[in-house]
Image (cartoon, rainbow, N blue to C red):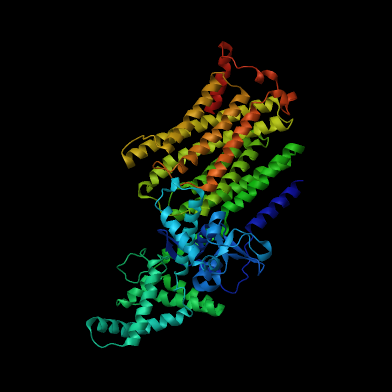
Amino acid sequence: MRKIFSLILFAILALLSAPVAQAESLDFKSFGKLPVSFNGRFQPLDSLARNSLLQIREKQSLYLKEEKRTMPAIEWLAEVMMNPEKADGRKVFRIDHPDVVSMLKLPEKNEAAGEDGKHYSWNQILPNQDALSGFDAEQKRIVKIEASHRNPFERAIMKLHERLVLYMRLKSTLQPPDAKDWAAEVANYKALIEPGVAAVRAQQAGRQYDEDAFDRFVNYAQRFDVMNRFEAPLVVPPHHPEVPKDEWMRMGEALLEAARGEKMHSSVEFYGSIVSAYRKGEPALFNQKIGEYSASLKPEFTKQLKKANAEHFYNSFQAFYRAMVLYVIAFLLACFSWFNMSKWLRISAFWLIFTGLIIHTAGLIFRMWLEGRPPVTNLYSSAIFIGWGAVILGLILERFYKDGIGSVVASMIGFITLVVAHNLSLGGDTMVMMQAVLDTNFWLATHVVIITLGYASTFVAGFLAIVYLARGVFTNGLTDALSKALSRMVYGIVCFATLFSFVGTVLGGIWADQSWGRFWGWDPKENGALIIVLWNALILHARWGGMVKERGIMNMAIFGNIVTAWSWFGTNMLGIGLHSYGFMDSAFKWLMVFMVSQLALIGLGLLPIKFWGSAKNLSKGDDEPPVKPGKNDKGAKKADGKLATA
């Protein structure tokens, strides 16, 4: 049996760590490692590709039905930047709102015609100018409305507008969208600069000038100015020693600077050759020029190259996806272990979770190193960190109790939080530059980390309570001994959660005092953090006062899931306060679903014991009204106190 599970584990790990085969003759991997500055930070083109496609399509790849293959994000980005005519035909724009589809007069769902009713191409959206005019008018009206006051249709309009603008920015990154042979155009422009500038100056002075040189030069300048105005990613490094190495330029800006007398940067010509080689289908030249350009950056931009290479590896490894897969498999093994009481299934689940935790930790540390920040800087990273903390707590419980419950809770929360993180990444780059008021590693490493551990432990207590109810109501596997053990687990975790949520809230007040000049302002986020502290304290006092027994503390712990989810997500979507990060349709829907599910579980927990599947295994005392503790209860209080201390 040991050999069988060892082989299973080895196969799973081998599958998860297997490198993806590179079938393309074009070296998109090296192209994806080239550094670019976007959203206030350096990143590889691979990150720009993944984040952009996530924003536009809500996926990191594009399935090409006609070619029967999946196009990776970096290949899609290369096509957008270097062959936009072909990219314009790809159905990458996701539109979920039917009224927006109707407004733009786009085709409805028709599987026979290859229309899924959700994804559309640039060529489908652009042609109908009347519909686009109406769309632009709506966008100008909606932009004046506060985000929190927009209805679903208005939010859908703004989301599509942002996607269209991003797409136009990407198309203008390396060349004008109408360019045919960019290398030749760059060479012609370089040769035209001197006579063109002379013609412009002569025309301005009222002297005779070369009209052909003037017209061609002005045409180039206008096209480059349009490129620059789209605020495309910055791909051209500075070539003056006195200019800081982090002040890169857009391609259009670098071309216009050459017209002002600056020397044309070599990267402009390198990218011209790369683009033309791509369009002409010359993979050898494409790969060669990428290698030469990368080598040319090494003497002065080693730091940027190293960061781009490291982030490319981080993207390719997909640590959180691999950990998520392991958590799912471990959850199933742990659940199956309850049905046949298999020790080896339970042990295998434990070590799978432990392996997933190692990968999860590696991804977390790598991300911290890339950002130069503590683990939690935004909602995305908070989901990753909450899952990480919950997995550790679950494994500790499993190590002591050895009954599969800790493994189930660890894998369940680990998987759910990583799914939440994945959906949060649909908003774009998850490593964007932080707001100035939050730009302090000390408070990010103290207040944010500590209060997030409070979130994680409160969720662990709540999910332990869910396991209690699931086994009690739907199976006959909940015994008195197991009920009391679970109650002790929840009690101990709630003590831990109360400490961390309280300390984290106090530290947050000190940070607020330093940042905004007041310790407490009844901000929704601040109130949410306080509610977590109060609710956990209420659970402990109800337990100490004898007002609740096993079932009572479990139901209260499940309600703690609602309290924590609201503080973590709900307060951010109210549109008010200093901690408001914006309303999200999908997040709000799933938040409501989660809350309703927790209330439904509490309803099950309030059913009389006689309706439970494990009714025969449980004493009836839990159905009796709680009584105030007397002198004989002091021993129980002391025991609980010892557990809390432990």
Could you tell whether 76 is left or right of 325 in the image? Answer: left
* Residue that sits furthest to the front in the current view: 130
Q: Is residue 150 above or below residue 45?
A: above
* Residue that sits furthest to the top in the current view: 631
Estimate the x, y position of residue 257 in percent, counting from the top left. 33, 74
Q: Residue at x 55, y 72 (%)?
A: 86
Estimate the x, y position of residue 336 in percent, counting from the top left. 73, 41
Quadrant (top left, top right, bottom left, bottom right) of the C terminus:
top right
Does residue 428 appear in this view? no
Name the quadrant containing residue 599.
top right
Q: Nearer the viewer, residue 308 or 130?
A: 130
Q: Nearer the viewer, residue 161 or 473?
A: 161
Estimate the x, y position of residue 216 in percent, counting from the top left. 37, 83
Name the quadrant containing residue 61.
bottom right
The number of numbered badges drawn on the structure is 0
Could you tell whether 425 is left or right of 322 in the image? Answer: left
Q: Residue at x 32, y 87 (%)?
A: 211
Q: Is residue 543 above or below residue 254?
A: above
Does residue 2 appear in this view? yes
Q: Nearer the viewer, residue 39 or 387?
A: 39
Q: Residue at x 49, y 45 (%)?
A: 382
